[in-house]
Amino acid sequence: MVNMKVIKAKNAIMTLVIIAFLLMIIIKMILVGKDKIKNVSFLPVIEDTIIATNGNSLKELKSIDRDNTEEILNSELKMSQYIKSNTSENMEVANNEQNQTNDNTQTDSTLEEAKTGLTTEVVDTSNINNKYTNEYNGVKIKNESKYELTEDMLVPNIELEDKKDVIIYHTHTCESYTPSPGYEYTQTGNFRTTDLNFSVVRVGRELKDRLTNYGFNVIHDETYHDYPAYSGSYNRSLTSIKNDLVANPNTQIVIDLHRDAVGASGTYAPTVKIGDDYVAQIMFVIGTDGGGLTHPNWVQNLKYAIKIAEKGNELYPGLFKPIMVRNSRYNQHVAKAATIMEIGATGNTMEQCLNSMKYLSKVMDEAINK
C-alpha cells in the first residue's frame, strides 16, 4: 500500500527545496550586479515585493520608486553590508557624536541674505524631468496623475492661516550628493550615507538656519527613515511627521526634503547660475489621491507649490524645474501646504545644494510674508 504521509512529506520537502533554490538564484543575481539582473524575468516580482513591503496601497506605491528599483536593490545591499561591518558599539558612538553636533548647532545670524536682480542662467542642458503638460503664468507642471488639471486648480489663491511655522523632515534621510572638496564622505549606498553631515539632512539644516533668519519658526526632524532599510520609508516618515504636528498643531508648511533620484550614475546635475553662485535646481513633487488613499489637501498643496515657484521665476528664473504631479500621496495629506522638494540630483555637489537654500529661503519669504 502507498503511504500517503510519506508522499506528502516528500512533496513538502520538494517544495521547500524549490523555494530555497529560487531564493538562491535571486540572491545570486543581486550579488552579480545590476547589469545582469536587468534581463531576469522575475524582476517584476522583486519590484512588487519591495513596493508591497512599504505597507501602503500597492496601487499607489507602484509609482513611488518604481523607476529606481535597481538603485533601491543596490542601496539595500550596500547598506546591509555596511551595517554588518559595524558593531553596535561603533554605531552608538556615531549617534552620540551626531547628537552632540546637533546640540551644538546654532543659527548663524551672519548668513548672507540672497540678493535679487541678479543675472540667472540655466547651466545644465539635460532635458530630464523638464517636460511639462500644463503651465500657469510661466510655472510649468508635468501632470502624471489620473486627473485633468483645470485652470482653477492652478490658480495659486491659497491663504495660509499660519505663515511662520515650518516643519522640515526627510523620508529618504540618507540621500547624498557627488563628493567635492570639503564635502568628501564614505558612501554607505549608491549616493547614500548615514553621516547626516553629508546627506540631504545637511541641506535641511541650511534651510532651517536661513528661514529662521527671515523670522520663520522651523522644526527640523532629522530622524532616519530609510535606514537601516529603504523599504517602508514613507510609513516611518508618516509616523514622524504626525508626531511633529501633534507637538506643533498649527503648522501648515511641511517640507519633505529629498534629492532627485534620477541619474543615479552621478552624471545628472540640474544647475542654475545665479550671479556668481552655482545653484542646484529645485523640483516640487505633489501627490494626489489618485492612488486610492484619502488626500483632501492635494489641490491646496499644488496651489502652494505654484505660488512658491511663481515667485521663484520672478526673482531667479530657472531655480525651479517643472512641478511633478503624481497619483501617490507621499504623506502630503497631513497639512495644507505639504510638499516634497527635491534639491538637485546625484551629480550636484553639497555646495550647490547649500547655495540653493540661500535662494529658496528668500523666495519663500517673499512669496509668503510680503
Image: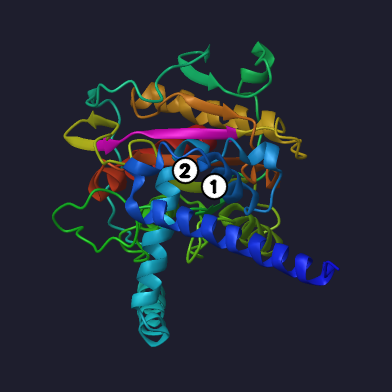
Q: Is 285 within the magenta?
A: yes
Answer yes or no: do the residues labelled 2 and 1 have beta carbons within 8 Å? Answer: yes
Q: Earlier in the sequence, mark 2 or mark 1?
A: 1
Query: Residue drawn 39% across and 87% down?
Result: 89
User: Is the residue 138 above or below the residue 219 in the image?
Assistant: above
Query: Residue drawn 60% across and 49% down?
Result: 49
Quick one: 24 or 155, which is closer to the camera? 24
Give coordinates of residue 83: x percent, y percent: 40, 73
Looking at numbered disc 1 in the image, what kind of residue is underneath it?
Ile
Query: Residue drawn 66% across and 67% down?
Result: 13
Q: Quadrant of the N terminus?
A: bottom right
Q: Is 42 within the magenta?
A: no
Judging from the image, what secondary structure is the residue with disc 1 in? Answer: helix
Residue lying at the far right of the rendered structure? 1
Query: To which residue does mark 1 refer?
Result: 46
Q: Is residue 52 left or right of residue 196?
A: right
